Image (spheres, grey):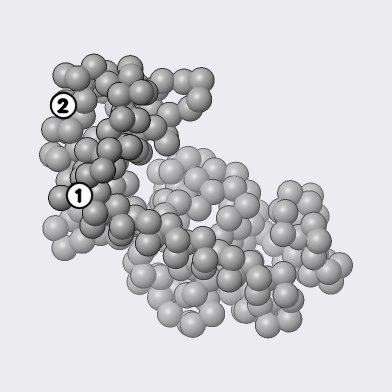
Amino acid sequence: MAAEIARRIPLLRAAPEKAVEEFDQYAVIQRIPAGQMVALEGDACQNFFTVLRGDLRVYKIGENGREVTLYHVREHESCILTIFCILSHNQFPAFAVAETDLEIALIQAPIFRSWVERFDVWRNHTFETLSQRLSDILRMLDQIAFQRVDVRVANYLLGAVGEHSSRIRITHEHLASELGTSRVVVSRILKDFEREGLVELRRGTILIKDREGLLKKVNRISVW
C-alpha cells in the first residue's frame, strides 16, 4: 500500500532509492472524515504527514472566540507548523480541521527528523513549504492591513468559484474565518453585493451572478 502511495507523491519521484524505500517501510495511510479535528493547540506533534487527498484548514482562535484561517494544506502538501513542531520539539500552536474527507500519509516524528538530517529531498521540502506558507501568511496580513473588507470578500468569491460553476458552498461564518473578520461584517457586505446584483444568497450557499462586477471591486484601489 505504501509503495503505491509513494508513487503518488511528486517529491519522491526523483528521490534517492533509499528515501523511497524508507517511505514505503514507515508510511501509514490514514483517512479522516470531513469536520474531524486533526490537531488542537498545545498538542504534541507525534507525526509528520503529507496530504494525499482533500483539504486541511489550519487556524487560530482569538480571545473573543473568532477564528482566523492561517492557511490550507491540500494534495501533495505538508503543514509547516507540524514540521517546525517536530524539528523544534514544541507543541502545535494552532488548530487543524479536515475541511473535506482527508487521506494522509503519516510518518512518526523521530523518523521524519532523521530523514531531514539524511536526505536532501526532505530538507528541500521543508524549505519549500516554509517559503510557500510564509508567502501565504504575508499575503493574508497585507490584505487584512491594507484592503477594504468588501474587496477581500469579492476576491475570495472569485477565487473560490469554479470556472464553469457559479455556486460556492460556504457559510457566512466560515467565510469570515477565512478572511479574519467578523460574521456580521461579512453578512452585511454580502447583502450589499446581493442588492447590487453581484450575488444571490441562499442557506449555506452563495451564487455568483456578476463576475465582472466582482472583478471591478477587486481591481479598484482601496485602502482603509
Choose mark 1 or mark 2, whichever is in front.
Answer: 1
Is residue 17 shown left or right of residue 180? right
* Residue 162: x %, y % from top left: 48, 27
Give the residue displayed 16% in from the left and 19% down from the top: 195
**Image position of 35 with respect to 20: above or below:** above
Q: Residue 37 or 190: which is nearer the viewer?
A: 190
Q: Is residue 91 in view from this perspective?
A: yes
Is residue 55 shown left or right of residue 30? left
Give the residue displayed 48% in from the left and 71% down from the top: 45
Amino acid on which disc 1 is placed: Val
Amino acid on which disc 2 is placed: Asp
Give the residue displayed 47% in from the left and 75% down from the top: 85
**Image position of 127 with respect to 99: above or below:** below
> Looking at the image, which residue sits at the far front?
221
Q: Residues within 10 Å of mark 1 (few under 14, many from 20)?
A: few
Query: What residue is shown with label 1?
Result: 223
Q: Which mark is residue 10?
A: none
